[in-house]
Image (tube, rainbow, N blue to C red):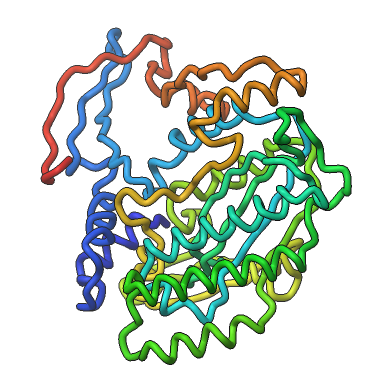
Amino acid sequence: MSLQQIIECGLKNKFGGKPLPPHMWRAAERITACRTAALGGHVQACPEEHMKRHWYNSCKHRSCPLCAFTSVERWLDRQKARVLDCDYYHVIITVDSALDSLWLANVRAMTDILFHAAKETLFELLGDVKYLGAEPGMTIALHTWGQMQGLHPHVHCLITGGGLRPDGTWRAVSNGYLVPGRVARDLFRGKFIAAIHQQLESGKLTVPNGERLQQVLNLLNKLGRKKWNVCIRERYAHARGVLTYLGRYMRGGSISNRRIISFDEETVRFRYKDYREDGESGGKKKEMELSLNDFVRRVLMHVPEPGQKVVRSYGIFAGSRRADLNRCREMLGQGPVEETEVRTWQECVTKLGDKDPSRCPVCGARLVCKRKYSALVSGA
C-alpha cells in the first residue's frame, strides 16, 4: 500500500469536487508522477549485458515520501557537523486547538508568529542571569499534524544546554532543568496572543469565514487564561537523537507508507498512536478508517506553501554566526566547523546496508545509460 496510489485515486475523482489550494494540487500531481514514466527517465544496462532496467526520475517534492530519504540524510550531515559538544534540551510548544480555523485562514502568517514567539520566549528566559544569562544555539522545526492526520500545529526546539555570554565566554546550564515549564508556558502564551492581536489590528491576519473579528478577540481573551502545552524534556547528552527525530519529519509528508493498512476507492485504513492515554512516553497503537477523500485532504493540508521554511536556526546556530559558533566550539574543545562533502544518493542508500543500485548485481560493474526519454508532464 502506498500514499502515492491513494493520492492518485484522489486526483482521479478530483477529491470529491471540493477545491484545493494550487500548491496542494501541484504537490498531488508531482507525488503521483514520482518515479514513473510521466517524469521521464533513462534506460540503464550492464556493460557486460547481465541486466537492463528502466530508471524513472524523481519529483523531488519535499512532501513526497519517495524523495525524502536522501535530502534528510544530507541535512543531517550538515547539522551534525555544526553541533556543539554539550548538553541539549528538547522543547515542544503547541498551539491551542481553538485557533485551528485562524491558522488555516492564515497559514504562512501564523507559522511566522509561532516561530518568532517560540524563539523570543526561550531567548528571553535564557538571557536572564537567573537561568543562564547567555545566548544559546537553537534549531526549531514545525510540525502541523497529529497521528490521525488532523491539524495540530506545534514546534520542536533543539536548544544547547549553554550559551555565549556577553563577555564572549561559554556558560553551561547548571540548574539541571533549562527553564521552569510554567514560566515558559505563560511567557509564550502572552507573546503568541499579543502577536495575533497586533496583526489583526494591522490587517495582516484574515478573520476566518463565518466568524467576526470580535469573536476572534473574545477567543484570544479566553485563551489568555488557559494553560497552554509547553513541554520541556529531560536533558540529552548530545544532539544526534533529537536531530534525527526532527529530520524524520522535515520532508516526506505527514504519514509513511508503513502505517497504511489498506485502501480502496472509498476508504483508507491506517495505524496511529493514541498519546492521550499514555502521553508522549508511550501511545497505544490503534487503527483508524477515513473516507479516501477525507484522508487525502488531511495529508495534503500539511504540504507547506512554496518558499515556506519549516526548519529555522537561531542564536549561535544561525547561518550568519559562524564566527561565534567556532568560538564556542573552541571553548568546548572542538575544531572549527568544516563543510561536509555532499553524499551522492548511492552513498546514502548503501549506508542502509543495501547494495549500490548504480552497479550490476551480477558482476558489480557500473551501469551505463543506454537511452534517455523525456517527461510527459509539464514542468518536470
- Residue 144 at what x, y percent from top left? 49, 63
Residue 22: tell me if it is visible: yes
Residue 292: tell me if it is visible: no
Drawn side of residue 48 relative to residue 120, left or right? left
Drawn side of residue 178 relative to residue 61, left or right? right
Q: Quadrant of the N terminus?
A: bottom left
- Please give the name of the residue rendered at 76% of the width and 55% of the height, measured from the top-left corner: 233
- In-front residue for pair 379/46: 379
- In-front residue for pair 118/13: 118
- Please give the name of the residue rendered at 80% of the width and 48% of the height, measured from the top-left corner: 129
- Residue 344 at what x, y percent from top left? 42, 22
- In-front residue for pair 276/96: 96
Q: Quadrant of the C terminus?
A: top left
- Residue 81 at what x, y percent from top left? 60, 24
Drawn side of residue 7 relative to residue 175, left or right? left
Drawn side of residue 360 relative to residue 282, left or right? left
- Please give the name of the residue rendered at 69% of the width and 26% of the height, measured from the top-left corner: 328
- Please give the name of the residue rendered at 52% of the width and 50% of the height, measured from the top-left corner: 249
